[in-house]
């Protein structure tokens, strides 16, 4: 290994001379561990002793970093993460010349550097001076405080103004032209455009047709071509296509394109999976939580029923991509006898009082089938709430017809049974007059509409998700969950470090009123279900790998209720994520505090 890497490590250790002394000494590893634990304990005690001298919030940060460092060098963390952070640092210093020592990445150095800065209380998170209003009281303090809050709001607005919303006049104009371009291509009429079956019949699945309708990058074209060749589900409804800008040069529609046009990495990884074992793509281990075909159960009172395993178009990061055969596939409906068996299973499980109908997208079924399913569920006395998960409000709002609303809404009986819709907007640029109308049709019948956001690279810039929540509330949608994109290899391009999710919640979403930031940020633990990320006591960082990725231990939601296994997860590297953001035009210093979210 390059000697400069060893020297770089030692330079970082210089921040805490006592730590450096221990690391370069000839003590054995256990001796070093003991001594480091001792200095960390002393540092922790001294922060308590000296606490009045350290600003409170800085003190919290120092305390947390010391605890984190102690945890990642503990034998327990080493066993669980199958990696010794301490031994690795020792190997770089003492055996760095040997080729057997993995080269530390810039991400590893960045993590170590921020850790030591945190322990030393030398971080670039807070301004050096105390806010001026805290020196005064009464009206003077109130005026100064108000001025500083206005500044914060102006900063927020500056970020939000960078992102387009589909309700902006310019966006409306662009989409009007796009729609007419698509209609001309298909020689169709405005009236046909409003027909959801016409939309489905004209779903674009062919790379050349897509290229005729919208400008594609070479990678986009090749990826769609390859998807087609290997029957990997791909399709875009004409409506959703009209949301893409004809030319992608402004970067406005990146999120819309990334949502539905796969990358080469995605296609190649899927093909590799196929060559081996398809079920390995079942990241959530649904096969282990399905007591009967068509049902998934992860919680005491709620079950998922999947009557149909297809969607009008496939989200590239879909966690069920291993189950979905094709876009709008006619053979994807669960056969009637299996659906009836699943319903019987629910009827015979009185502990269940809430059913989530999902798939795939249940609104791809005919009105008659949807009504029939709701009717059968409504006859089960213990079912008090039925959630319908559908992204058609975003990809095919034409599907939300008055007839469908009528067939669904009469099962919504206040005081007895609640019907609600859970949809999936990913970006304000997906919001349109049509999607708002679809939402409002449900709202007029007292049916609540909620949103599940998957937090991906493409909607993770500063205040981007915050703007989405703000706009969603304006069109009548309540933010419900923000999910960490799953740890599947094919969706690597989409993944965002957990620390960014936490940062977004604490520094961006937090500035919005409580009526807007109603969502819970969650990480879906395979087999077990949602883990609340906001609650720090539900997960711990237990190691940092040579490539800069953090290893987390998630505590299951049953914690303190029942014994269950914890779940170990390797995140994506913060450093690589920030570099990607930088290449996307972001200023990395806007994200400085990300390192201190664990
Ligand atoms: S709408 Fe849901 S089920 Fe359908 S492809 Fe997207 S994430 Fe998957």
Image: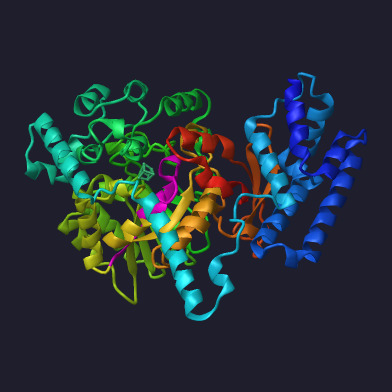
Total count of labels: 0
Q: Measuring 44% from the left and 51% from the top, which residue is drawn there?
A: 295
Q: Residue 373 placed where, x, y %?
A: 30, 57
Q: Residue 580 placed where, x, y %?
A: 49, 34
- The front one of 452 and 110 is 110
Q: Measuring 56% from the left and 58% from the top, which residue is drawn there?
A: 534
- The front one of 122 and 429 is 122
Say whether residue 194 is visible.
yes
Q: Is residue 532 above or below residue 187?
A: below
| In the displayed structure image, the side of residue 9 where residue 487 appears, left or right | left
Q: Is residue 457 magenta?
A: yes
- The front one of 454 and 141 is 141
Q: Measuring 51% from the left and 75% from the top, which residue is drawn there?
A: 141
| In the displayed structure image, the side of residue 514 where residue 174 appears, left or right | left
- The front one of 68 and 455 is 68
The span shown in magenta is 447-468
Q: Is residue 267 magenta?
A: no
Q: Quadrant of residue 262?
A: top left
Say whether residue 357 is visible.
no
Q: Residue 177 placed where, x, y %?
A: 14, 38
Q: Is residue 229 above or below residue 484?
A: above
| In the displayed structure image, the side of residue 397 where residue 595 appears, left or right | right
């Amino acid at each position: 290994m390059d000697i400069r890497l060893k020297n770089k490590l030692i330079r970082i250790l210089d921040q805490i001379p006592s730590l450096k002394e221990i690391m370069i000494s000839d003590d054995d590893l256990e001796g070093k561990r003991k001594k480091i634990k001792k200095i960390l304990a002393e540092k922790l005690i001294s922060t308590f002793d000296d606490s009045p001298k350290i600003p409170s919030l800085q003190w919290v940060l120092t305390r947390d970093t010391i605890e984190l460092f102690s945890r990642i060098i503990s034998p327990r963390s080493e066993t669980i993460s199958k990696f010794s952070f301490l031994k690795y640092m020792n190997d770089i210093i003492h055996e760095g010349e040997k080729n057997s020592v993995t080269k530390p990445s810039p991400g590893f150095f960045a993590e170590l550097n921020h850790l030591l800065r945190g322990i030393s209380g030398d971080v670039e998170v807070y301004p050096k001076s105390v806010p001026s209003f805290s020196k005064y009281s009464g009206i003077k303090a109130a005026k100064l405080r108000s001025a500083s809050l206005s500044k914060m709001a102006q900063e927020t607005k500056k970020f939000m103004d960078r992102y387009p919303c589909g309700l902006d006049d310019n966006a409306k104009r662009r989409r009007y032209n796009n729609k007419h371009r698509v209609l001309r291509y298909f020689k169709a009429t405005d009236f046909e455009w409003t027909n959801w079956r016409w939309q489905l019949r004209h779903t674009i699945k062919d790379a050349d047709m897509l290229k005729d309708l919208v400008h594609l990058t070479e990678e986009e074209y090749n990826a769609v071509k390859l998807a087609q060749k290997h029957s990997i589900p791909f399709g875009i409804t004409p409506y959703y296509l009209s949301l893409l800008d004809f030319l992608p040069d402004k970067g406005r529609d990146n999120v819309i394109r990334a949502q539905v046009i796969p990358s080469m990495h995605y296609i190649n990884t899927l093909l590799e999976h196929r060559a081996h074992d398809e079920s390995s793509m079942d990241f959530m281990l649904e096969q282990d939580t399905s007591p009967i075909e068509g049902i998934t159960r992860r919680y005491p009172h709620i079950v998922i029923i999947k009557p149909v395993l297809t969607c009008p178009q496939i989200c590239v990061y879909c966690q069920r991509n291993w189950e979905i055969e094709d876009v709008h596939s006619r053979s994807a409906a669960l056969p009637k006898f299996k659906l009836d068996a699943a319903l019987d299973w629910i009827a015979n499980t009185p502990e269940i009082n809430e059913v989530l109908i999902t798939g795939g997208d249940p609104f791809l079924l005919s009105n008659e089938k949807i009504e029939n399913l709701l009717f059968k569920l409504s006859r089960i006395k213990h079912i008090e709430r039925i959630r319908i998960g559908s992204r058609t409000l975003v990809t095919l709002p034409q599907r939300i017809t008055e007839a469908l609303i009528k067939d669904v809404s009469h099962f919504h009986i206040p005081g007895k049974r609640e019907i609600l819709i859970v949809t999936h907007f990913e970006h304000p640029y997906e919001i349109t007059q049509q999607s708002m109308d679809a939402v409002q049709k449900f709202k007029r019948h007292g049916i609540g509409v909620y949103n599940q956001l998957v937090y991906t690279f493409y909607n993770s810039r500063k205040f981007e998700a915050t703007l989405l929540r703000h706009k969603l509330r304006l069109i009548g949608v309540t933010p419900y969950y923000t999910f960490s994109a799953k740890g599947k290899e094919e969706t690597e391009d989409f993944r965002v470090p957990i620390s960014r999710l936490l940062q977004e919640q604490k520094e961006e979403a937090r500035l919005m009123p409580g009526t807007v930031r109603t969502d819970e940020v969650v990480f879906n633990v395979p087999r077990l279900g949602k883990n609340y990320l906001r609650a720090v006591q539900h997960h711990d960082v237990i190691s940092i790998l040579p490539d800069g990725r953090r290893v987390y231990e998630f505590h299951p939601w049953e914690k303190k209720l029942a014994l269950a296994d914890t779940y170990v997860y390797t995140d994506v590297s913060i450093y690589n994520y920030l570099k990607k953001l930088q290449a996307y035009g972001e200023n990395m210093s806007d994200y400085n505090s990300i390192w201190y979210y664990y």
